[in-house]
Amino acid sequence: MNGDYCSDDSGGEKQDAVPMNAARPHGQDAAAAAAAMEGERPDATPPDAEAAPAADGPIPSTSDAAADPDGPTSSQAAAAPAADGPIPSEAAAAHASDELPKPSDAAAAPAAREPNPSEAPAAPVPGGPTLQSAGGVSLEDCQEQLDHACGQYPDLANIEASCAEVMAALLRKEHYSDPASKILSNLASHPDLLIAASICSGTGSFEQVLHHATIALREAFGLCSGHVEPAFASELVDNKARYCMSVLTELTDGGEFCMYKDATKLLDDSSRQCAMHCGKPCRLPEKLTCFSAGFSCTSYSMLSKDATKNATAMQKAKDDDPEGHVASVTTFHACLDVVDTSRPTWAIFENVESIDREVDPDTQTNLQLCLAALEERGYVARSFLLDALWYGLPQSRRRVYIVCLAVGDREIGCSAEDFFNSVENLLGKLYMDAPPADEFLLPDDDPRVLQYLDTLKSERDKKLSKDEEKEERLEKWMALHMSVAEKRGIEWPLQIHPDIRQSEWFGILTERAKEVVGFGSDERERLGRRIDYCDCYHSANRYATSHTHFPICLPRTIGWSYVRQRLVLGRELMMLQGHTPLNDDANIDEGKPFSESLLGNLAGNAPLGQCQ
C-alpha cells in the first residue's frame, strides 16, 4: 500500500523481503537465526534466567490461557530483518540483531505494480478458463480499484475482508499487466464448492480467509462461483472451541458443521464426539477440497527447555515411538490421519521456523520428515518461510508454511509444477506495506477499552492479598532486575517517566511489569532508542521492544504502548494477527462477552490470516 508507512530510518543496508522456499541456514548459525526470528536472544540466557518467575499479575488473567510454547522475546529479536531468499549462514548471527527492513524496501514487488496506464485491455489468459470480467477494463480501472481497496485497509470492522479486497485487486491488475500469466487460470479451476476442514482450529481463521478470498475473487473476476462449506474443525481447549464454533456458525449462517475436541482421536469412534451434534461420533468426510492445521509447536520451538532434543523430535518418534507420543509429533500425526481419510485436494500447515533446525548433517530436520510423510501419501509438498510484515501486518512474525497438492487430483486443473510456480509468483506479487501498529488499535475512549481498564482494576484489587504471599518469588525477580540495571548502568530504583506514571493503566500493572515498562522507558529516554511497544510479560532480561511495528504476538503477551500509555487489548492483538474478533452478540453462549484474556491467547496461537 502506501510506502510512506514503511520508510527505513535504521541506517542499515536495505534488503529485499521476498518469500523463500525451504532452504535455510543450518547448524549453529541456524539456531541463532531461528532463535532471533522466534523471539529469543541468540546469546546464552543468564544462569539466573530460569529462576525468573512467570508474570504474576492480573494482566491478562491466566485462567483460560494455555502454556506459552514460544517463550520469551527480545528487542533485538523483534527487529530481526526479513531476507531475500535463504539467510546466508555466515551472516545469521548478524541478522539476529539488525532492524527489520520495511516491506517498501522490497525490490521485487513494485515493478509489477507500475504498468503503463495507456496500455490496451488485455486478452484472457491463453489456454486457461475464460475470466469473467466487464468489457473495456483498462489498467487505469485496475489501479483505481486497487487504490480504493488500499484506502479501506485496515478496516477494523473486518480486516480479513479488507485484506482480501486488496489482494484481489492486485491480482486483477497483475492479470491485465501480464495477460500471459498462468496465476489466475490456475485459480479459476477450483470447483464451485470448497469443502474445508481444519484442526487446531483456534480462531477459525482458515475458513474465514477462504470465505473472504472467494468473495473477493468472484467480485474481481467471476472466479470461485461457489462458496466455502466447513466440514469440521477441532480445538482442544474448551473456551477456544466455543469461540471457533461461534465463528463457523456465523460463517455458515447457522449451517451444518462438526466440532471435535481432541484431533488425535479423530479415527476413534468411541472418542470422536461432535460438540455440534450432542456428542455423536459423526463420520469424517470421504473427500475434502482443502485442509489446514497450525499444529502444535512445543516440540519444535527453539524456546523450549529441551530445544536441542526437540530438533530431532520427529526422528525420535519415528525410531523409538512409531505412534508419536510427543505433543507436536502426535498432533502432526493427527493431520496425517485426516489426509489419509479425507484425501484433501490441497492442504496448508503452519509452524515455527525452527521446525527446520538442523542438528547434524546426517539427521533429517523435523520439517524434512513432515514433507517426506506427505510425499509418501502421494502429495507434492513445498515449504515457504513467510513474515507477517510482508503482507500488511505490523508485526514481525516468521513462520513456516507447508503447502501440499494431491498428485493427479483433477480438481486443481493444472500440474503440480504450474501450481507451485503460481504460488511462488503470487507470494512475490502480493506485498502489502504494513501500516503502523497504532492504526490497528481502538480509540482510547472506546467503550471496550474503558471496560477492560475497569475489569483490570477490579482484578488487581482482588489479587493484592495473594501477591503478598509471594515474597520469595518477589525477591528473585527484584534481584534479577537490579542485576540487569547494574549491567546497563541504570540508576536504581528506576526513574520512570512522569507521563507513564500518571497513566491509570500503569497503576494497575504488577510491580514486576511496571519495572519492565520502566526498562523500556529507559531505552527510550536515556539511550534515545525509538521504541513504541513493549511486551512486559517477561522479566527485564527477556522482554521485547519494537518501533512502529508490534513485537511478535505470543499466547501470554502483555503489550504496552508507549504511544498510547496503555495496555494493548486482546482483541487488538487479534487484529494485529489479521483477524477481526467476533462481536459478543455472535457468541453461541447467548451473547456472553469474549474476554480480552481469551482473545489475546487466541491471537498468540493463531496462524496469520494474510499468509494463509
Image (cartoon, grey):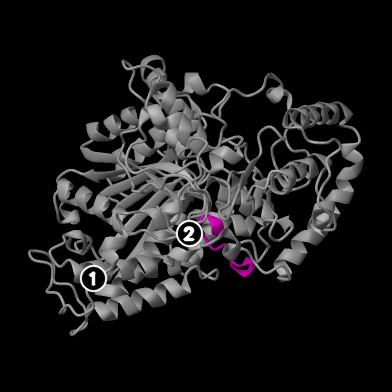
Which residue is depicted at the point 69% across and 37% down?
538
Which residue is depicted at the point 19% across and 76% down?
132
Q: Secondary structure at mark 2?
A: helix
Q: Secondary structure at mark 1?
A: loop
Q: How far apart, in angstroms, are the residues tagged by discs 1 and 2?
A: 22 Å
Asked if residue 604 is positioned above or below residue 315 in the image, the reply reads: below
Q: Position of residue 523 (x, y in %)?
A: 70, 44
604 sits to left or right of 344:
right
483 sits to left or right of 160:
right
Asked if residue 328 is positioned above or below residue 459 in the image, the reply reads: above
Amino acid residing under circle 1: Pro
| Rendering quarter of residue 453 | bottom right
- Label whose residue precedes the other's in the sequence (1 or 2): 2
How many other residues sit within 10 Å of disc 2, few (<14), some (14-19) or many (≥20)? Answer: many
Q: Is residue 545 magenta?
A: no
The one nearer the camera, 366 or 52, is: 52
Q: Position of residue 406 (x, y in %)?
A: 22, 44
The one nearer the camera, 460 or 488, is: 488
Q: Which residue is mark 1?
A: 115
In magenta, the rendered stretch is 575-587
Task: Please state the total of marks drawn on the protein image.
Answer: 2
Which image quarter is the N terminus in? bottom left
Q: Main secondary structure of the magenta part?
A: loop
Mark yes or no: residue 300 visible: no
Q: Give the residue furthest to the left.
A: 127
How many other residues sit within 10 Å of disc 1, few (<14), some (14-19) or many (≥20)? Answer: some
Which residue is depicted at the point 57% across and 62% down?
581
251 sits to left or right of 130:
right
Amino acid residing under circle 2: Cys
| Rendering quarter of residue 381 | top left
Q: Position of residue 508 (x, y in %)?
A: 83, 51
Q: Which residue is mark 2?
A: 6
